Amino acid sequence: MAVTLDAATVDDIVNRLELARTTKIQIRQVTLEHPDMTIDDAYAIQRAWIDRQLASGKKVVGHKIGLTSRAMQQAVGIDEPDFGTLLDSMVYEPDADIPFDDFVEPRLEVELAYVLSGSLEGVGITADDVLAATAYVAPAVEIIDARIQRIDPSSGRTRSVRDTIADNAANAGIILGGHRIDPSTCDLRWAGAILTQNGVVEETGLGAGVLGNPTLGVVWLARKYAQFGLALTPGQLILAGSFTRPVFVSRGDEFVFDYGDLGRFGARFT
């Protein structure tokens, strides 16, 4: 695939995405206006939006991997995950009040975060390389959002993966909590979590839901970035991919995220 959208079109879409973020009013699916746009176009829009955030003073703290389950990939018609960028403005403290108005249409996904102590660079990166370059793994919850309409109100059409990628792979926030662990000391395939919303268990899952092992999510991302001559660097945190379905958030909701031996934490959306 290749980039088909010109710079002016990309800039216009970035302007509208930023307006949606600030006004909390979703924009129409980009692929309805540009049906021939490619995955490469979607990433070009994402990069331009991130560049806009960096120019305003925000900083990159890491990266996220999405669409890691086979079921989700089949649902959106792709054969590999997608990725987005985490900014310092997206990080929220555990067991704290989170302003609901920071988001447009928030949902939560349970994940594991890898915090790097070393660099990961090259198309030959392995799981052992990832473990050697990881300072620790910690429980994390990703707050995903939709600045682009998920369902087109006129046609009922569901947004495509190209829309989601353009929208920074739907990322809007991250909550880190629980205990820091050495990933070489446990089998992260069996790392589990229970998501409770307003006292009701809504989701449970295991790390194996991420490509069979969440470490393989980080492997995929490092290899993907290497195709662009980029590396994952020390200090960055990598969201390895969700192992539960997204859970919608309403104002006033209270959540508990129980990772068993890895600890538990909560969040309140006020």
Image: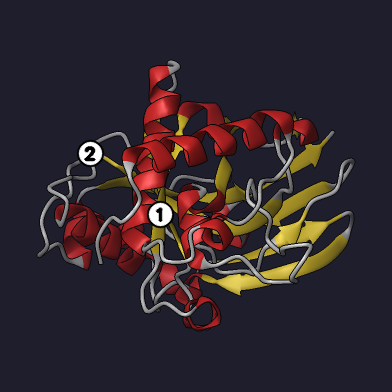
Tell me where residue 230 appears, x and y as whole percent. 17, 45
The image quadrant that residue 202 belongs to is bottom right
Q: Between residue 173 and residue 183, name the one nearer to us.
A: 173
The image quadrant that residue 18 belongs to is top right
Tell me where residue 197 appears, x and y as whole percent. 83, 57
Residue identifier under label 2: 233
Residue 176, can we see it? no
Tell me where residue 228 appears, x and y as whole percent. 17, 51
**Cβ–Cβ below 8 Å for labels 1 and 2?**
no
Q: Residue at x 54, y 67 (%)?
A: 160
Q: Between residue 43 and residue 136, name the one nearer to us.
A: 43
Decide if residue 199 is on the left or right side of residue 183: right
Decide if residue 6 is on the left or right side of residue 262: left
Instruction: Look at label 2 and name its amino acid.
Output: Thr
Q: Residue at x 60, y 59 (%)?
A: 110
- Residue 42 is tagged as 1
Give the mark nearer the N terminus: 1 vs 2: 1
